[in-house]
Amino acid sequence: MTYKADVFRVFIASPSDVRERDLIREILAEWNANKASEKRPLIFQPVGWETHTFPDLRFPGQYQIDQKLVDKSDLCIALFWMKIGGSLHGGTSGTVHEIERFRSAGKRVMTYFCKRRMSQTDVRAYRDDIESLDEFRRALEGIGRIDGYDTRGELKNKLLSTLDDVADEHLP
């Protein structure tokens, strides 16, 4: 039987080294399939640059992401591992820019840092990124709560629990 539900657009933000972007989509789909109901009329719709933007040379890529996705999404799930992300023209990474845009709009940002072990080759190759990311993580810790995960299973469990809390807050 059909029922009306609110759709929360969930923007997935991460630098290119994060492998869990597709996992976030799977987790949201699992939550929707198992938890959304007439009593809990909420659907989480994943959105990301790779699925919701298209080639367009009229505007810079980040502008399109901001206008079509960030500004129209209800919450952000941000993931980091080794890299802070590619630099925009102002020097800030695209992922950091997206988080700040969400925060300045008063929207929820759920930020997770992968604690998976890095190879020595990666540590040497991304040393500057790792230092910048550590600095950014410390800054976020001074603002609010962030979280970490070692495995995909741990991230899944944490995120499913958090989505329950978000849905419960949404109930009348």
Image (cartoon, rainbow, N blue to C red):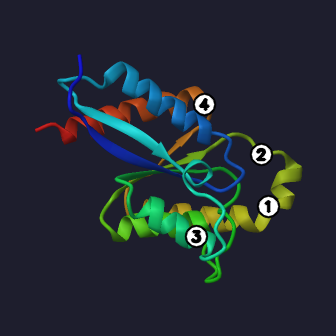
Question: Pointer 1: what residue?
Answer: 126
Left of 145 or right of it: where is 88? right
Contact (Cβ within 8 Å) of mark 4 with mark 2: no
The residues tagged by marks 4 and 2 sit, at their Cα atoms, a distance apart of: 16 Å
| Residue 101 visible to an observer of this rendering | yes
Q: Residue furthest right?
A: 121
Q: Is residue 46 above or below residue 156?
A: below
CA gap, disc 2 to disc 1?
A: 10 Å
The residues bearing labels 3 and 4 have C-alpha atoms spaced at a distance of 28 Å
Q: Earlier in the sequence, mark 1 or mark 3?
A: 3
Which one is in front, 68 or 132? 68
Q: Tag count in the figure?
A: 4
Q: Residue at x 86, y 59 (%)?
A: 124
Determine whether label 2 and label 1 are within 8 Å by CB. Answer: yes
Q: Which of labels 1 and 3 is toward the front?
A: 3
Q: Amino acid at mark 2?
A: Met
Name the quarter where the N terminus is drawn. top left
Which residue is denoted by mark 4 in the rendering? 152
Residue drawn where x is 70% and y is 58% of the image: 83
Measuring from the top left, give residue 111's x and y in whole percent: 48, 51
On residue 64, the disc is: none
- Which is more toward the observer, 160 or 120? 160
Q: Is residue 164 above or below residue 91?
A: above
Q: Which residue is mark 2?
A: 118
Do callouts 3 and 4 mark residues in contact (Cβ within 8 Å)?
no
First in residue order: circle 4 vs circle 2: 2
From the image, state whether disc 4 or disc 2 is nearer to you.
4
Q: Quadrant of residue 3?
A: top left
